[in-house]
């Protein structure tokens, strides 16, 4: 995409997070920027996410990069501040698109899903959600609700906590259902034909 076109558009969410962080804290390197964003954004990110956002925002002309002690230091340009303002005022999608491989496997494979293998994936997801919920609750609990900025951050964390809590409840219900159906099918195999193939 041509440079001027990028400048006229608004940034995607991670680029916006980078712009907002550097606009607030001033020029900085990748790692400190990542750590600050990681403590604010209510979903999982990696340093690679932030590095990619820094690169795309630099290409768009929203950031300038300089070398300090052989390390890249990024700073927000005037065009970057304008892009951030456009992003803040842009209408969001009514409903975000949900693309989840675990759900896709269940939907597409149906009766052909290998129950034991799938339950292993469910258990792994449950564990990761529990760890993430603990971290979000810790971050949310450390915020001062009397401070408007921190209160807004707390609202964001509470939204994410609610989303993850709903997913955890769904996973646990799915776990129970699949285990019960697998057990029932095992009993049916002992009693005769007419079983569903989960294994």
Image (tube, helix red, strand yellow):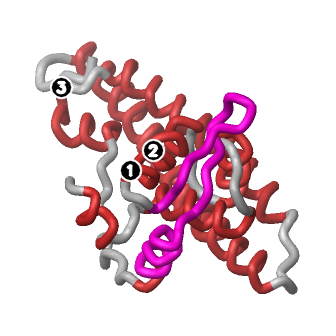
Indicate which disc residue 59 carries: 1
Give the camera-side residue of 167 and 83. 83
Q: Residues within 10 Å of mark 3 (few under 14, many from 20)?
A: few
Question: Which element is circle 2 on?
Answer: helix
Quadrant of the rendered structure where residue 60 is? bottom left
What residue occupies the far left of the structure in this picture?
194
Give the camera-side residue of 59 and 37. 59
Mark 3 or mark 1, whichever is nearer to me:
1
Query: Where in the figure is residue 174, as x and y percent of width and height?
Result: 42, 43
Indicate which disc residue 55 carries: 2
Give the camera-side residue of 75 and 160. 75
Query: Where in the figure is residue 140, as x and y percent of width and height?
Result: 77, 64
Indicate which disc residue 112 carries: 3
Residue 17 lies left or right of residue 183; in this view the side is right
Based on the picture, tell me whether residue 135 belongs to the magenta stretch: no
Mark 3 or mark 2, whichever is nearer to me:
2
Based on the picture, tell me whether residue 85 belongs to the magenta stretch: yes
Question: Which element is circle 1 on?
Answer: helix
Query: In the rendered view, would you say 180 is above or below 1?
Result: above
């Amino acid at each position: 995409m041509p440079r001027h076109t990028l400048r006229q558009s608004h940034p995607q969410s991670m680029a916006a997070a980078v712009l907002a962080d550097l606009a607030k804290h001033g020029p900085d390197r990748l790692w400190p920027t990542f750590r600050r964003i990681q403590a604010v954004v209510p979903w999982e990110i990696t340093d690679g996410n932030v590095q990619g956002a820094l690169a795309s925002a630099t290409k768009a002309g929203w950031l300038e990069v300089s070398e300090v002690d052989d390390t890249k230091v990024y700073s927000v340009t005037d065009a970057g501040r304008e892009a951030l303002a456009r992003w803040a005022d842009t209408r969001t999608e009514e409903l975000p698109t949900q693309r989840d491989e675990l759900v896709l496997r269940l939907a597409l494979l149906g009766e052909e899903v290998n129950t034991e293998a799938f339950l292993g994936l469910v258990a792994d997801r449950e564990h990761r959600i529990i760890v993430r919920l603990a971290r979000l609750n810790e971050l949310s609990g450390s915020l001062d609700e009397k401070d408007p900025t921190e209160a807004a951050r707390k609202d964001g964390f509470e939204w994410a906590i609610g989303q993850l809590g709903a997913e955890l409840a769904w996973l646990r219900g799915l776990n129970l259902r699949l285990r019960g159906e697998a057990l029932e099918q095992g009993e049916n195999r002992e009693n005769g034909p007419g079983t569903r193939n989960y294994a």
